[in-house]
Amino acid sequence: MIAKLTGILDSVGDEWAIIDVGGVGYIVFCPSRTLAALPQSGQAITFHIETHVREDHIHLYGFSDVSEREWFRILTTVQGVGAKVALAIMSVLNGDELTDAVIAEDKAAIARANGVGPKLAARIVIELKDKIGALTIGSAAKLAASLSPEGDVTSDQDAVSALVNLGFSRIQAVGAVARANQELGANAVLDDLIKSGLKELSQ
């Protein structure tokens, strides 16, 4: 299995790049965001690789960093999401944006990707909430703060901690507090955030 390729960028297509490693050209399929960030042909590059082996082919999927590759792996565990759809999603949303979309249950953002309809977007949100784990920690806190830019970020954090202490997962708690901020406004106090979050999570 190939996990990483370092070589010279040979050429770039709409969905792929060819990397020359010791005189051997490997075609690597990538999200369009990754392709857009590549240097000019002839420059050194590194791809973090996910290898898919099938009876009739071996496909290499390339990413700019390990986190991007992990998102690809997680996406392809969702029923109905193959490699092509995962790349399409990652072409319109980076890791932080995807995290934010899942936390906020923003199915429309995910449905912007080619091949993703409303039903699949809803399934992705539901299944990813249970799977993204540690990948969400940094972005989740950032989202909660961004939804109440004029409010008390400490209250947001305390509300999240309170909900976690009541047995809810961190991603559930952050999502509930973020939506409570949207509903109650920037001046919401801690007790109201907890009550609103608890009400939503108990439905």
Image: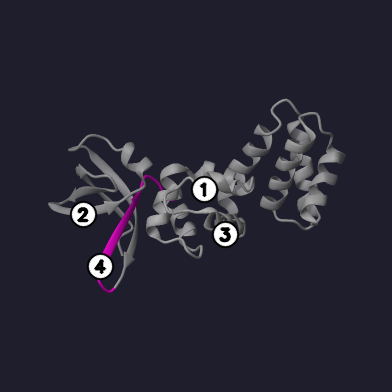
Q: Residues at badges 3 and 4 in contact (C-beta under 8 Å)?
A: no
Q: Which residue is at 23% across, 40% downward?
A: 44
> As shown in the figure, which amino acid type bears the numbered disc 4?
His
Look at label 1 and name its amino acid: Ile
Q: CA distance from mark 2 to mark 4?
A: 13 Å
Pointer 3 residue? 123
According to the image, label 1 marks what residue? 110
Residue located 28% across and 74% down the image? 55
Q: Earlier in the sequence, mark 1 or mark 2?
A: 2
- Badge 4 element: loop
Between disc 2 and disc 4, whose residue precedes?
Answer: 2
Span highlighted in magenta in the image = 55-66
Q: In the rendered structure, which disc, 4 or 1, sits on the residue that comes first in sequence?
A: 4
Q: CA distance from mark 1 to mark 2?
A: 30 Å
The residue closer to the viewer here, 188 or 21, is 188
The residue at the far top in this view is: 150
The quadrant of the image that shows the N terminus is: bottom left
The residue beneath circle 4 is 57
Answer with left or right where residue 151 lies relative to residue 99.
right
Mark 3–mark 2 contact, CB under 8 Å? no
Whether label 1 touches label 2, CB < 8 Å: no
